[in-house]
Image: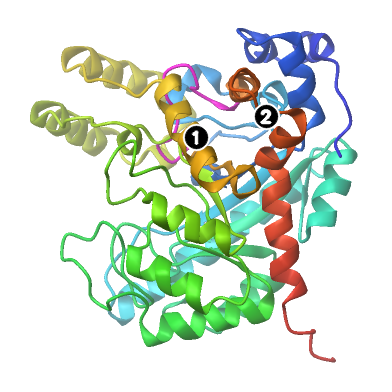
């Protein structure tokens, strides 16, 4: 397990670290610091190509433009998690597939470059034992995952190369259907009625390699088929509860129970639009679109333009206010899922830097609030260790134990 760190010492050394302790008791801080705290969905690699942006700097001033960096990971006791290779679903012709292939490899290179640039602070993890060793040495545990298998569409055998370079979790789809299966949110509806033939082959290959399969964003039919086909437990890396807010991206209680029965884990999402109903305001949407055209993609925003961009965005938000999900509303999903799945089958995947974060849980420095709330709800220190990392590492171990032995050179 990770080294215990003195909260007061951290507050003195790390900028913003005092915010992590705000609103949490010393007892909660102790439990939080003793746990191996992992998040299964860190979209932060989207920031790694921003001119002037560094994972080593505290970007708290940027608000939800940047929610994860090393100072705030330390402040919030986040030992690490899965850095995501995210690829937006584009055209599925040959040109689009090549673009997705190239994007995925570039995003993977960005993650590996980040780790190489900060060897004293971060280390690539390939196994559950690696995670415990790395955290014990005081470094950030760095797994790699893929959200949307589109980079593999042109050549599914690339999964072997990704695995050799560190990939340990694979999500099938994003917000649109792809060559491997149906999304939960494609306006066109189901294309494959679950997994495609290529998707079924991909499941078998992931099992052979020991890569954990992730059903977040996938349709219910894909979830059902993954659960039936996979020889290892699967996960939902960032998904919330239909019973609390009925949304296609969320999951119903019956499927949560089925996931638990097969040994899987659901990691609860903090994306506000999946937690509560947030009606869209057309004028706000149009103003935000104009802002995006003016400044370009947030992931490419130069450091010297951030202040101007944020000022204009905040002016739009003030002109067209909309409700935001709160910490209590996030906890309603987490506590419900814990009740349905059981404490052995729940984790945290808040979708940081991918739209996650709620009022009272704005960035990773606030993570001890979750531990405080779990203790208040009656969960024990042992329970909390399972939720923060133990359940995830169990699934990883099971996936890897079931993998085929590596071929002889």
Q: Which mark is residue 164?
A: none
- Dominant SS type (magenta): loop
Q: Is residue 282 visible?
A: yes
| Residue at horizontal 67 percent and vertical 29 percent from the top | 73
Instruction: Name the residue nearer the viewer: 246 or 119.
Output: 246
- The residue carrying pointer 2 sits among few (fewer than 14), some (14 to 19) or many (20 or more) residues within 10 Å by Cα, namely many
Residue 122, quarter of picture? top right
The secondary structure type at the circle numbered 1 is helix
Position of residue 129 relative to residue 245, above or below, is below
Residue 371: percent from left, percent from top: 65, 24
Which is more foreground, mark 1 or mark 2?
1
Is 362 colored magenta in this rendering?
A: yes
Magenta highlight on residue 409:
no
| Label ID, residue 334 | 1
Q: Position of residue 298 (x, y in %)?
A: 38, 37
Quadrant containing the N terminus is top right
- Nearest the viewer among 333 and 180 is 333
For label 2, the SS is helix
- Classed neighbour count for the residue bearing mark 1: other residues with Cα under 10 Å, few (<14), some (14–19), many (≥20): many
- Dividing the picture into quadrants, the one containing residue 3 is top right
Q: Where residue 272 sits in the image (x, y, percent)?
A: 35, 32
Relative side of 215 to 76, left or right:
left
Q: Position of residue 324 (x, y in %)?
A: 31, 22
Q: Tell whether 361 sits left or right of 8.
A: left
Q: Identify which residue, 69 or 183, lies in the foreground.
A: 183
Question: Bounds of the magenta span?
Answer: 353-364
Q: CA distance from mark 1 to mark 2?
A: 21 Å
On residue 73, which mark appears? 2
């Amino acid at each position: 397990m990770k080294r215990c760190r003195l909260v007061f010492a951290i507050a003195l050394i790390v900028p913003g670290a005092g915010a992590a302790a705000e609103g949490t008791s010393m007892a909660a801080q102790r439990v939080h610091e003793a746990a191996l705290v992992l998040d299964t969905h860190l979209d932060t690699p989207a920031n790694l190509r921003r001119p002037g942006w560094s994972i080593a700097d505290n970007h708290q001033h940027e608000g939800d433009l940047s929610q994860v960096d090393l100072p705030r990971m330390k402040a919030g006791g986040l030992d690490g998690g899965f850095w995501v290779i995210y690829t937006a679903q584009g055209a599925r012709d040959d040109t689009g597939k090549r673009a997705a292939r190239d994007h995925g490899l570039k995003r993977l290179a960005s993650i590996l470059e980040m780790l190489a640039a900060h060897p004293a602070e971060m280390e690539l993890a390939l196994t559950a034992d690696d995670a415990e060793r790395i955290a014990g040495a005081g470094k950030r545990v760095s797994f790699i995952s893929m959200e949307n298998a589109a980079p593999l569409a042109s050549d599914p055998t690339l999964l072997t190369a990704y695995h050799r370079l560190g990939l340990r979790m694979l999500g099938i789809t994003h917000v649109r259907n792809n060559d491997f299966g149906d999304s939960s949110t494609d306006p066109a509806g189901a294309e494959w009625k679950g997994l495609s033939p290529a998707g079924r082959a991909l499941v078998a290959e992931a099992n052979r390699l020991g890569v954990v399969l992730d059903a977040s964003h996938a349709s219910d039919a894909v979830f059902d088929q993954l659960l039936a086909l996979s020889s290892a437990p699967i996960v939902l890396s960032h998904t919330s509860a239909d019973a609390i807010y009925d949304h296609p991206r969320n999951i119903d209680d019956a499927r949560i129970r089925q996931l638990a029965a097969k040994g899987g884990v659901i990691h609860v999402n903090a994306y506000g639009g999946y937690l509560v109903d947030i009606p869209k305001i057309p004028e706000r949407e149009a103003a935000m679109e104009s802002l995006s055209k003016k400044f370009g993609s947030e992931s490419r925003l130069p450091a010297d333009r951030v202040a101007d961009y944020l000022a204009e965005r905040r002016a739009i938000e003030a002109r067209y206010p909309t409700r935001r999900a709160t910490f209590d509303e996030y906890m309603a999903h987490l506590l419900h899922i814990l009740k349905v799945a059981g404490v052995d089958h729940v984790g945290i995947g808040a979708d940081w830097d991918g739209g996650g974060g709620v009022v009272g849980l704005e960035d990773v420095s606030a993570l001890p609030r979750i531990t405080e709330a779990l203790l208040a709800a009656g969960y024990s220190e042992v329970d909390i260790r399972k939720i923060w990392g133990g359940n995830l590492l169990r699934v990883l171990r099971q996936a890897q134990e079931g993998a085929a032995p590596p071929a002889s050179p």
